[in-house]
Image: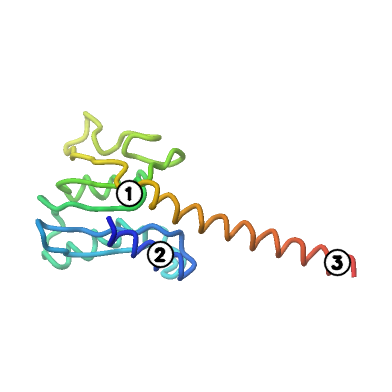
């Protein structure tokens, strides 16, 4: 999870929502990813999807059986769907996402009984650190936005 946190911090430095992911096959790291939605102008460029894409290229197979994905935030429905399609072996995540989490917080996509693949999920690993990176990022954005609004109001009065 420490490696995924490092990816999240790199995303934050790039102005992206700080989510990071790292994918392993056994002890071998196959891929890492960070949110690249703004950078790539791609709504599907979530950290998890980026890591899944790279791992598929590394293995020359979109099936990621026996692989474990470590992610700093509970995946959304899109990412959960990609994990199911890839037949991912296991997911480990840090912070829960009560608004869009698809591993049990909001939806239960990863282990929905009617889907053709389910996978073990381990939640809450380094949850405070993972959530802290997100909180710091959004706190800084709100301060920046508030400062911009204050400057704009002062300019309008002047």
Q: Residue at x 16, y 58 (%)?
A: 24
**C-alpha separation, residue under disc 2 versus residue under disc 3:** 36 Å
Residue at numbered disc 2: 9
Left or right of residue 151: residue 18: left
Q: Residue at x 14, y 67 (%)?
A: 58
Left or right of residue 38: residue 118: left
Q: Residue at x 58, y 60 (%)?
A: 141
Picture quarter with the C terminus: bottom right
Q: What is the number of the mark on residue 126?
A: 1
Q: Secondary structure at mark 2?
A: helix
Q: Secondary structure at mark 1?
A: loop
Question: Along the polypeptide, which appears first: circle 1 or circle 3?
Answer: 1
Residue 39 percent location from the top left of the image = 44, 70
Question: Along the polypeptide, which appears first: circle 2 or circle 3?
Answer: 2
**C-alpha separation, residue under disc 1 versus residue under disc 3:** 45 Å
Q: What is the number of the mark on residue 36?
A: none
Picture quarter with the N terminus: bottom left
Residue at numbered disc 3: 156
């Amino acid at each position: 999870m420490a490696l995924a946190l490092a990816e999240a911090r790199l995303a934050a430095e790039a102005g992206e929502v700080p989510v990071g992911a790292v994918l392993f096959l056994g002890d071998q790291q196959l891929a890492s990813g960070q949110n690249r939605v703004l950078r790539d102008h791609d709504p599907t460029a979530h950290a998890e999807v980026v890591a899944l894409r790279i791992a598929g290229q590394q293995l020359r197979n979109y099936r990621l059986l026996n692989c474990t994905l470590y992610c700093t935030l509970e995946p959304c429905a899109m990412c959960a769907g990609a994990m199911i399609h890839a037949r991912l072996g296991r997911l480990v995540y840090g912070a829960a996402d009560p608004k869009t989490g698809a591993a049990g917080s909001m939806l239960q996509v990863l282990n929905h009984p009617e889907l053709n693949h389910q996978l073990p999920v381990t939640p809450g690993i380094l949850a405070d650190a993972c959530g802290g990176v997100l909180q710091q990022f959004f706190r800084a954005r709100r301060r920046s936005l508030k400062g911009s609004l204050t400057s704009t109001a002062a300019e309008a009065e002047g």
